[in-house]
């Protein structure tokens, strides 16, 4: 299985897979196991397609990646590959299962998620994931790291037992504070019911901006009768090495 996985990755990268660090997924391993055991690939391929879609890979990229596996499997011994990868050579049932699974995720996100949050005007988590993909690609192109160049500055508050307008007011206040401090083109987004974030560069302004957010958030909450007993929290999250891991981090932060 490891040999198959290795040759699949090599073939996929040679065929143009754009982000080598993001290629590995648990679903890749499941597909390799199924292929190694000569099992039906339709179910694992559908899981693979959904996983690729969730990490932001396009349909063309996903099909080309799967075609690389198909090319490896057709090579003598599944080892040496001397043929060009061609998605059109995928068996029709496999092509259909992959495309339908990928489209299910894409359509669900397109119909249920907007670019901007209607309450705060900040970006949605989906847009932040897209922006992060661009940032990871940019850093990879220039030989730097997202971990070293960027950080997530987060502002949140615990509102257990608080309902109705107070929860909305808290989120609006947090968004307004973030927007007032990070006004230099940073990506600002809502991550959860009471959490907002700024994707900011690690530069000489970062410490001052984070301190300003902390002071302003406490000040705004202090003058609101319904929120004065709440203490906003400001912290920084180190971005992981891959876009896939960053998306997982956003989901975790959104759940609080």
Image (cartoon, grey):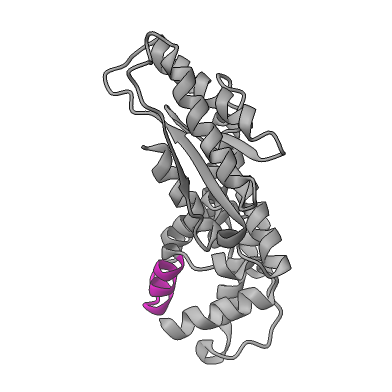
Does residue 164 sit above or below 64 in this rendering? above
Residues 143 and 19: in front is: 143
Q: Residue at x 33, y 14 (%)?
A: 163
Left/right placement of residue 216 relative to residue 182 reads left
Does residue 14 sit above or below 185 in this rendering? below
Position of residue 162 measured from the top left corner of the image (x, y, whole percent): 31, 16
Q: Which residues are magenta?
A: 28-39
Dominant secondary structure (helix, strand or loop) of the stretch shown in magenta = helix
Image quarter of the C terminus? top left
Does residue 122 sit above or below 59 in this rendering? above
Using the rendered view, name the quadrant where residue 71 is placed: bottom right
Residue 119 in view, yes or no: yes
Does residue 80 sit above or below 228 in this rendering? below
Q: Residue at x 53, y 32 (%)?
A: 213
Position of residue 211 measured from the top left corner of the image (x, y, whole percent): 52, 38
Residue 114 in view, yes or no: no
Tally the numbered discs: 0
Magenta stretch encompasses residue 215: no
Using the rendered view, name the quadrant where residue 43 is placed: bottom left
Q: Residue at x 43, y 73 (%)?
A: 32
Residues 72 and 208: in front is: 208
Q: Residue furthest left?
A: 161
Magenta stretch encompasses residue 36: yes
Residues 44 and 74: in front is: 44
Residues 5 and 195: in front is: 195
Using the rendered view, name the quadrant where residue 44 is placed: bottom left
Position of residue 48 measured from the top left corner of the image (x, y, whole percent): 48, 59
Image quarter of the N terminus? bottom left
Position of residue 124 measured from the top left corner of the image (x, y, whole percent): 57, 33
């Amino acid at each position: 299985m490891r040999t198959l996985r290795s040759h699949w990755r090599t073939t996929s990268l040679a065929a143009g897979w754009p982000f080598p660090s993001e290629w590995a997924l648990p679903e890749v391993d499941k597909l390799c196991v199924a292929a190694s055991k000569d099992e039906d690939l339709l179910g694992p391929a559908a899981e693979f397609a959904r996983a690729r879609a969730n990490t932001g890979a396009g349909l063309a990229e996903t099909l080309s990646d799967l075609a690389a596996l198909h090319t490896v499997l057709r090579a003598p011994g599944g080892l040496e590959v001397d043929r060009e990868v061609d998605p059109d050579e995928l068996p029709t049932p496999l092509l259909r299962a992959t495309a339908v699974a990928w489209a299910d995720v894409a359509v669900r996100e397109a119909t249920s998620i907007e670019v901007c949050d209607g309450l705060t005007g900040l970006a949605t988590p989906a847009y932040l994931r897209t922006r992060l993909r661009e940032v990871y690609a940019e850093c990879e192109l220039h030989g730097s790291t997202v971990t070293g160049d960027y950080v997530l500055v987060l502002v949140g508050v615990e509102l257990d037992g608080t309902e109705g307008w107070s929860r909305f007011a808290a989120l609006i206040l947090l968004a307004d504070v973030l927007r007032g401090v990070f006004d230099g083109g940073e990506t600002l987004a809502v991550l959860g019911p009471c959490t907002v974030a700024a994707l900011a560069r690690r530069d000489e302004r970062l410490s001052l901006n984070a301190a300003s957010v902390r002071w302003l958030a406490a000040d705004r909450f202090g003058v609101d009768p319904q929120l004065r007993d709440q203490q906003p929290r400001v912290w920084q999250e180190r971005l992981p090495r891959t876009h896939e891991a960053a998306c997982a981090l956003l989901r975790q932060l959104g759940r609080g």
